[in-house]
Image: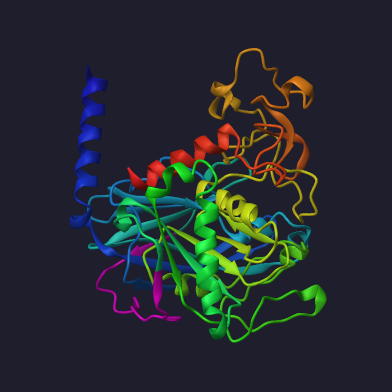
Amino acid sequence: MKKLTTFILVLVTCNSLFANFDSIFYNRTLRIDYTHTGDKTTESWFIDEVKTEPFWGGTHTKLIDTLMYGKYFFKVFDFKTGTLIYSRGYGSLFAEWQTTDEAKSISRSFPESVIMPLPKDSTKIIFYSRNIKGIFEEKMNYMYNPDDYFISPERRLQFPSFDVSITGKPNEKVDIIILPEGYTKEEMGKFIGDCQKFKEILFSFSPYKERADKFNIRGVLAPSPQSGTDIPADTVWKETLLNTSFYTFDSERYCMTRDFKSVRDMAANAPYDQIYILVNSNKYGGGAIYNYYSISVSGNLKASKIFVHEFGHGFAGLGDEYYTSDVAYSEFYPTDVEPWEPNLTTLVDFEKKWKKLLIPDVPIPTPDTGIYRTSLGAFEGGGYAAKGVYRPKHDCLMNSFNGKVFCEVCQETIEKMIRFYTE
């Protein structure tokens, strides 16, 4: 009886908190920029600047992140009461760089940032990083004071936004902001058309097409001085607003940007939950990191599947299920730790993954042969490793582009994330 009473009290407290978003937050954004520095085994965090932005695109109800996805996590506590009022998981380019061979020999620094609804009162914000065992460790904290006159409302990269597909209020939808990269002023019409193509492609794949009414999509009319993007190995260098480049970590198809401050600056022109960068290029490539940004080229013949594959990373936290790759990572997933990604497992704690979805007679690990090719199981090879990491199905859009569907595990994860943002 005591446990039931405690549970009801907690539930009532949470519901009361969620029902009073407007008493705790302004419907605007607090953004904390910081620098992440280190090498393969060390990391340091340094506050850069703190800003306010005019829009908040996030939910007003799911303020506490119960999914616990991401390499990093932050929590926001009311300073007076110590109450947890907001939390989110996320990833970063620095975390991926730490797994490259280069990180064994040199140190680098990367700009990063987090956003949250703007608190009305003082708060304590604590940043966490997963250690090698997958456990979150506290790394940095910041005391937010709403009266601090060094918190800047100044805006950079201000441009008009436009609606691609609007189905409701930002706080009740998944809000995607599409940013143009390497589109000149004369190519803004092409960018608008590419945004329409993005919408049509996204909603042609399940489960997005069944949930199209849960999404808002907007674009930003931000022309770059030059058309295209950097391709260092071909000595191609373009002057663009977001400074994207192929050959990230010396992987030819990996097109990303380290200029995350500019990404955040441009995204601030409209309310958003997810950032998608469209690169004006025909060269095959892209990339995405959970709650960081997603990026893909707009002109390659495989662009449709690149769109949805990369969005699977950025939006739903899905991991790559392939293993025959030229990616630069080494030992990305320790085989004695269960990955946080919902569609990968090392079988260390398979009970918490998709084991409940399997039919009883499917062996674990699952042979990648005849009768099991269409079954849900645990197939060895995934997360860039041929051994020790397992994927849910023989193939999936998070594995290859041979098919046109997500496996059942990925579909369930995407649907869960849509509900998190919209219900």
Image height check: is 21 above or below 250? above
Question: Split into 4 quadrants, where in the image is the C terminus?
Answer: top left
Question: Split into 4 quadrants, where in the image is the N terminus?
Answer: top left
One can see residue 67 in this view: no
| Percent of width and height locating residue 81 | 23, 50
The magenta segment is 141-162
Does 158 lie within the magenta span? yes
| Percent of width and height locating residue 411 | 53, 37
One can see residue 49 in this view: yes
Question: Going 53% across and 52% down the picture, which residue do you hit?
Answer: 202
| Percent of width and height locating residue 151 | 34, 76
Image height check: is 310 above or below 183? above
- Considering every residue shown, the one lying at the far bottom of the view is 225
Image height check: is 373 above or below 255? above
Count numbered badges in the picture. Answer: 0
Question: Going 29% across and 74% down the picture, which residue do you hit?
Answer: 148
Q: Is residue 217 left or right of residue 363?
A: left
Q: Quadrant of residue 270?
A: bottom left
Colour scheme of the picture: rainbow
| Percent of width and height locating residue 420 | 39, 43
Closest to the observer, 107 or 359: 359
Image height check: is 322 above or below 142? above
The secondary structure making up most of the magenta span is: loop
Question: Going 50% across and 63% down the picture, which residue do you hit?
Answer: 196
Q: Quadrant of residue 110?
A: bottom right
Does 368 lie within the magenta span? no
Q: Is residue 168 left or right of residue 310?
A: left
Closest to the observer, 199 or 400: 199
Question: Going 54% across and 21% down the picture, which residue do you hit?
Answer: 356
Q: Is residue 208 left or right of residue 40?
A: left
Q: Quadrant of residue 169?
A: bottom left
